[in-house]
Image (cartoon, rainbow, N blue to C red):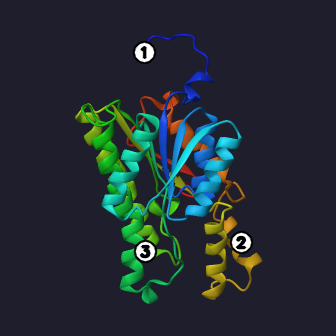
Amino acid sequence: MGEARMSDSNDVFRLDGKVALVTGGAKGLGALTAMTLARAGASVMVTDVLETEGRAVVGQIVAAGGKAAFVRHDVTDETQWEAAVATAISSFGQLDVLINNAGVESTELLAQVTVASFRRTMDVNVTGTFLGLKHAIRAMSPGGASGRGGAIVNLSSVAGIVGVMAHSAYCASKGAVRLLTKAAAVECAQLRTGIRVNSVHPGLIETEMGANLIKGFVSLGLAPSIDDARASLTALHPMGRLGEPEDVANAILYLVTDASKWVTGAELSVDGGMAAS
């Protein structure tokens, strides 16, 4: 066991002097995560295919006294990943944190899922995460363009741990992200890169994506109304409510600060108890 010592508990949750890249940062969980990391002192590179919304998030961060910039970025394109990482480093001098947040979700019965839809889900959610890991690890590892080590958080889902109705492709993709995270964490640790890799597994969150999921249950005839769909999905969470974006953003903050400096390869469920029930 390590030697006990006194420290300011607030300091370990700070990111002063650190640089973070957040994919899918234009809205929802990505936007709030970018703002949360900026409030903790990080300079944040916000990336997304939604340029207007992404620049608006940067504007909010800067207006609040933070540092941020935006780059348009399709996470399925390796060339754009190389450019996004390079731009973060050229803009802010280094790269210490990557949040692989960009993702897509669809509510479809398995027998109706098209090959194109399945491939699109896997391409964004899995290939996008793989490419982020690949290029962040290259940059953060000793001898890389930044070379200071760092922390990576991959957004998986409770649907990467348990099966969810009408979410076969999404479950498959998020299960892949879960194990990809663990493989990357072990590799980075054993190669002594100084890079930690963890995954976060949200339940149903009060975002536009969460609202679309609820609507999808109604459109498939799995619930007679929005209220009924919301009630049945809420009931899957033992704590009796849906999650709020800040619940997830604060969990991510923990995983990229020194508060979690001996945590890697972990899966943090932020799901009101759904995976445990």
Three-letter code for the amino acid on which mark 1 is drawn: Gly
Looking at the rendered image, the disc whose residue lies closer to the viewer, 3 or 2, is 3
Along the horizontal axis of the image, is 191 left or right of 73?
left
Where residue 47 sits: x, y (%)? Answer: 49, 55
Q: Could you give the CA–CA distance between mark 2 and mark 1, rounded to whole angstroms?
A: 47 Å
Q: Earlier in the sequence, mark 3 or mark 1?
A: 1
**Location of mark 3 (residue):** 169
Element carrying mark 3: helix
Element carrying mark 2: helix
Numbered label attached to residue 146 = none
Is residue 118 placed above or below 274 in the rendered structure?
below
| Residue beneath the point at 60% across and 87% down | 220
Is residue 101 placed above or below 196 in the rendered structure?
below
Give the quadrant of residue 79: bottom left
Q: Earlier in the sequence, mark 3 or mark 2?
A: 3
Q: Could you give the CA–CA distance between mark 3 and mark 2, rounded to whole angstroms?
A: 21 Å
Where residue 241 sits: x, y (%)? Answer: 72, 58
**Location of mark 1 (residue):** 2
Along the horizontal axis of the image, is 221 left or right of 152?
right
Give the quadrant of residue 55: bottom right
Where residue 102 sits: x, y (%)? Answer: 48, 60
Crowding around mark 2 (Cα neighbors within 10 Å: few <14, some 14 to 19, many 20+) is: many
**Location of mark 2 (residue):** 230
Is residue 232 placed above or below 53 in the rendered structure?
below
Q: Earlier in the sequence, mark 2 or mark 1?
A: 1
| Residue 47 seen in render | yes
Three-letter code for the amino acid on which mark 3 is drawn: Ala
Count of marks, rendered view: 3
